[in-house]
Amino acid sequence: MKKQVIKIMSLGALALGLMGCGQVKENDQKEIGIIQYAEHQALNDSCEGFLEGLAEAGLKDGEKIKVDYQNAQADQSNLNSIAQGMKGRKDLVFTIATPATQAALNADKETPTLFTAVTDPESANLVKSNDQPGTNASGTTDMTPVEKAVDLLLKINPEIKAVGMPYNSSEVNSEVQFAAFKAYAESKGLRVEAQTVTSTNEVQSAITTLAKKVDGICLPTDNTIAQTIPTIGKVIKEAKIPTIGAESAHIEGCLATYGVNFKHLGRQTAEMAVKILEEDADISKMPVEKSNEYELQVNEEMASALGIDTDQLKKGE
């Protein structure tokens, strides 16, 4: 009787094991975790573009992949909790913005982690170098040619004397952009003003102050700035200060934008993800990619309010 019970139990265990194997095969989905730093248009577009790119490659959520999307709402403690919760549980993690990527890599140094909406991966210590990451991370950078923004201001008014940039001083990516902006603007003989903030609550006051000091403003790809574009637009329209944005999502509050389209950047990152998930590419050897597409957008309503001929901006583009 004892042997019979053991035999029955063994057969039952085997049956469960076979059922388990069949279930794994039937639901053989790759698990992808998405960690988004905050809620604003550029980051939302990045996520949307990434998922669209995967779907077009045959990797649709609910079919070949299972997506776990988490938004930290710009809260560092949320970021850390989300990153810890995904540690070792995903086939790939997609991070949107520098803080999200830093949190993910602090928590997990094994799972392939692709980032986007990151300006300078090297300065943020996400990779050893952009050409040879040497870590479990790579992705796409949203670094924009800040020189172009300065040139656009000079095209509007060759007589300008001072330009400024508002940015969050706690964001490494913004510090990098300001340094490049300052160097180029000064090489053109312009005085440069910085107006730093630490939260969205300070932006309106900062832009109001900056507008009194300069003849033109350039915006960086900065999460705090991105969350307050409508406020910025209202201030610069009243002050009649031409402002150039660094990403397409800035257009609502700027005269013009020249920079990355974040949905396109998300799609570009999806191409890297496909290589990892479908071709077993080694992420540590995948170079960080710059956007392969920049675009000029002009806000005709803002131009009219500022009394600027948009043909000046579009000429030669």
Image: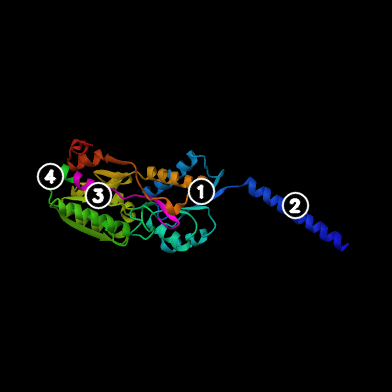
Q: Which residue is mark 1?
A: 280
Inter-mark Cα distance, 4 to 3: 17 Å
Left or right side of 146 for 125: right
Q: Is residue 99 above or below residue 144?
A: below
Q: Residues within 10 Å of mark 4 (few under 14, many from 20)?
A: few
Q: Nearer the viewer, mark 1 or mark 2?
A: 1
Q: Quadrant of the N terminus?
A: bottom right
Q: Which residue is mark 2?
A: 15
Inter-mark Cα distance, 1 to 2: 33 Å
Query: Which of the two labelled residues, at mark 1 and mark 3, occupies the earlier sequence position?
Result: 3
Q: Which residue is mark 3?
A: 146
Q: Nearer the viewer, mark 2 or mark 4?
A: 2
Amino acid type shown at disc 3: Val
Horizontal and vertical percent position of residue 207: 23, 55
Left or right side of 117 for 87: right
Q: In terms of secondary structure, where does tag 3 sit?
A: helix
Magenta highlight on residue 286: no
Q: Which residue is mark 4?
A: 158
Q: In terms of secondary structure, where does tag 4 sit?
A: loop
Query: Which of the two labelled residues, at mark 1 and mark 2, occupies the earlier sequence position?
Result: 2
Q: Residues within 10 Å of mark 1 (few under 14, many from 20)?
A: few
Evaluate if marks 1 and 4 touch, with contact meaning CB atoms under 8 Å apart: no
Q: Residues in magenta?
A: 133-152
The answer to whether any part of residue 21 appears in the image is: yes
Q: Nearer the viewer, mark 1 or mark 3?
A: 1
Residue 172 bears which disc, if any? none
